[in-house]
Amino acid sequence: MPQVEITIGGRSFEVACQEGEEQYLTSAATMLDAEAAHLSAQIGRMPEARMLLMAGLMLADRTAGLEDQVRESERELKRLQAQIEHISSRPPERIEVPMIPHEVHDSMAEIAARAEALADQVEAQA
């Protein structure tokens, strides 16, 4: 079982961990050390047990807040997924585009041709 030396609040500790978990232990120790440094800056020197307890409680409080955010995000995700399922389960909306009758189309083409002919006449006379 590997032994990892960590430093928290300026104090060194030798801690055993499972094979391959050294990086996780070092990362956790770094977080705890940051909280201990914050405490030391605010309160000053304190007994080791109290420093570790306070730093652990601060991390636990932050973790609880993050867990609340995760739960809220999961609820929102489920709500959005339910909305998507509801929308996708409905039959597609049918949109009808009115068609122009052929007679109207033919009449419009005839009017356009007459207008062009008149424009040609006016141009020729000018």
Image (cartoon, grey):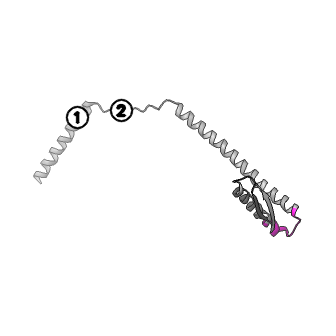
The outermost residue toward the left is 125
**Badge 2 is on which residue?**
98
Q: Quadrant of residue 26?
A: bottom right
Q: The residue tagged with tag 1: helix, strand or loop?
A: helix
Is 43 magenta? The answer is yes
Q: Could you tell me which residue is drawn at 74 percent across and 52 percent down? A: 18
Q: Amino acid at mark 1?
A: Ser
Q: Position of residue 68 (x, y in %)?
A: 73, 48
Q: Amino acid at mark 2?
A: Pro
In the image, residue 124 sits, relative to residue 76, either above or below, namely: below
- Tell me the distance, in whole angstroms, between the alpha carbons under discs 1 and 2: 18 Å
Q: The residue tagged with tag 2: helix, strand or loop?
A: loop
Give the position of the C terminus as an image quadrant: bottom left
Q: Which mark lies nearer to you, 1 or 2? A: 2
For the stretch drawn in magenta, what is the main secondary structure?
A: helix
Crowding at mark 1 (Cα within 10 Å: few <14, some 14-19, many 20+)? few
Range covered by the magenta-colored residues: 37-48
Disc marking residue 107 = 1
Q: Could you tell me which residue is drawn at 57 percent across and 33 percent down? A: 86
Q: Nearer the viewer, residue 122 or 29?
A: 29
Crowding at mark 2 (Cα within 10 Å: few <14, some 14-19, many 20+)? few
Q: Nearer the viewer, residue 28 or 14?
A: 14
Mark 1 vs 2, N-terminal side: 2
